[in-house]
């Protein structure tokens, strides 16, 4: 059974190709700095946007043509497994990611949900064994079901907390069964709608308790992989507790979870928080906590989590530079938490959009590698902080200075002189790397 009978394995045809179903920039076998592009990028397909999303929005019904949809939810779930592996195979992408709810219907009880998950993960495992495709991460959807109206780990209702715990436990069992390389927590409803009736202290303590239970359980079942928090400032909550990378790190340190958790950073969540993707990655790197990436792009004019396929070369190049500085992204990857626009409703748009996203990331990676090779930023930074490599600056960095010695220095040496950064020129030359 094929869902894309007219699409063959996507090939690299070079930048002059006019074929929408070919890579123009992403050549999986191209070697840069001793590794293939495929090894650098570790691309993943997001199950929810690709196989589950219907294209509905708050003002309109679903529009996407998806041949795997049927009346019987379990049959549809099986169909989606077929379609997922066909896409991975034809795109030449090695990884995928899912929420429990993306792969299996909930049925009428938790028991039935778990039974459905068991059946579908058996099928997924069979396919993985056959194709060598891998699970970058899985997660539990603890935001769609009405029970999570007030949150999951942060719910004021302990019975709901227990449900969340059950889903996380199952999620970790599934991670072990399928050899997931990471496990993600995105807390869409782990926040508040209003502080008027909220016990913020208890809610945050409880989220940390749930995380600690996950750490404990992963040790118990002998399957220890990086846990990843995915920060987002808001939407659907008015305020989400893991607002951004810095807030998430403060949380992890407060609850002594920093050794078990890293961050899964999403471009669109960064801009929702009033940051850039580059900023979020840089903050994570300063904590040695860059775990994985959700690649997408937010339409700033619209202002919500539009989850567009990456298309902004500057944004992605600066992000790929952080990735290179991080020494790569493994065991994380670049997951396309991206969905086709509502007007791109045909089946083959799923391919066209992934190809475009992969091309954008590949171009950006190459530009970033060149920036690194040329020492573009390294030179700028070295020059800018030069005063710390000798004399009084070196004393400060080495911990040999104090307020008295510095006051003496300042009194003796007169007014400090600053240098212009010529930043306009820097940005102009940076643009040259993008084309
Ligand atoms: C939503 C999030 C979500 C996570 C996984 O905004 O990006 O899709 O990646 O729960
Ligand atoms: Ni995401
Ligand atoms: Ni998102």
Image: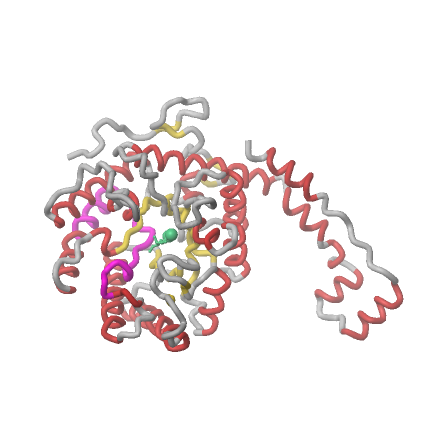
Farthest left residue? 72
Q: Is residue 254 left or right of residue 90?
A: right
> Going 29% across and 34% down the picture, which residue do you hit?
90
Q: Nearer the viewer, residue 269 or 45?
A: 269
* Magenta highlight on residue 143: yes
Residue 162 pos. (x, y %): 24, 72
The x, y position of residue 323, in whole percent, is 50, 48
Asked where in the image residue 112 lies, by quadrant, the reply is bottom left
- Start and end of the magenta stretch? 122-147
Q: Position of residue 159 (x, y in %)?
A: 23, 74
Q: Quadrant of the N terminus?
A: top left
Let me know if residue 170 appears in the view.
yes
Using the image, determine if residue 394 lies above or below residue 317: below
Query: Residue 406 at what x, y percent from top left?
Result: 80, 70
Asked where in the image residue 370 lies, by quadrant, the reply is: top right
Query: Is residue 241 left or right of 160 when viewed as pictured?
Result: right
Above or below: residue 198 compared with residue 134: below
Residue 208 colored magenta?
no
Q: Nearer the viewer, residue 165 or 385?
A: 165
Viewer-proximal residue among 337 and 89: 337
Q: Residue at x 26, y 28 (%)?
A: 7
Count of numbered marks = 0
Placement of the C terminus among the 4 image quadrants: top right
In front here: 283 or 289? 283
The structure's colour scheme is secondary structure
Residue 132 appears in the rendering: no
- The residue depicted at 23 percent of the width and 57 percent of the height is 177
Answer with the quarter of the image where residue 183 lies: bottom left
């Amino acid at each position: 059974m094929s869902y894309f009978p007219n699409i063959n394995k996507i090939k690299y045809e070079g930048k002059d190709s006019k074929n929408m179903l070919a890579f123009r920039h992403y050549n999986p076998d191209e070697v840069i700095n001793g590794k293939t592009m495929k090894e650098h990028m570790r691309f993943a397909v997001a199950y929810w946007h690709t196989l589950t999303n219907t294209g509905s929005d708050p003002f309109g019904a679903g529009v996407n043509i998806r041949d795997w949809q049927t009346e019987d939810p379990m049959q549809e779930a099986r169909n989606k497994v077929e379609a997922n592996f066909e896409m991975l195979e034809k795109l030449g992408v090695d990884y995928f990611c899912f929420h429990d709810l993306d792969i299996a219907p909930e049925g009428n009880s938790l028991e039935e949900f778990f039974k459905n998950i068991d059946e579908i993960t058996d099928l997924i495992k069979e396919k993985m064994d056959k194709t060598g495709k891998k699970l970058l991460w899985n997660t539990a959807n603890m935001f769609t079901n009405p029970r999570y109206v007030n949150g999951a780990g942060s719910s004021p209702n302990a019975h709901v907390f227990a449900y969340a715990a059950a889903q996380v436990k199952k999620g970790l069992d599934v991670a072990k069964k399928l050899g997931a390389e990471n496990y993600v927590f995105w807390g869409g409803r782990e926040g508040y709608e209003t502080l008027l009736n909220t016990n913020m202290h208890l809610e945050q303590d409880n989220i940390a308790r749930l995380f600690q239970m996950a750490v404990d359980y992963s040790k118990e079942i002998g399957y220890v992989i990086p846990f990843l928090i995915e920060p987002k400032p808001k939407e659907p909550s008015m305020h989400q507790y893991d607002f951004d990378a810095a807030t998430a790190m403060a949380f992890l340190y407060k609850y002594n979870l920093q050794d078990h958790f890293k961050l899964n950073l999403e471009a669109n969540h960064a801009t929702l928080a009033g940051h850039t993707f580059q900023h979020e990655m840089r903050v994570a790197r300063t904590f040695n906590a860059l775990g994985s990436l959700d690649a997408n792009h937010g339409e700033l004019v619209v202002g919500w989590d539009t989850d567009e396929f990456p298309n902004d070369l500057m944004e992605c190049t600066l992000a790929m530079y952080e990735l290179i500085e991080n020494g790569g992204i493994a065991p994380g990857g670049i997951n396309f938490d991206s969905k086709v626009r509502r007007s791109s409703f045909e089946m083959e748009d799923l391919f066209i959009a992934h190809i475009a996203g992969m091309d954008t990331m590949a171009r950006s990676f190459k530009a970033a590698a060149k920036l690194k090779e040329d020492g573009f930023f390294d030179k700028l930074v070295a020059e800018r902080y030069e005063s710390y490599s000798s004399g009084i600056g070196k004393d400060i960095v080495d911990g040999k200075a104090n307020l008295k010695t510095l006051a003496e220095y300042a009194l003796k040496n007169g007014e400090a002189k600053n240098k212009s950064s010529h930043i306009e020129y820097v940005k102009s030359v940076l643009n040259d790397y993008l084309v």
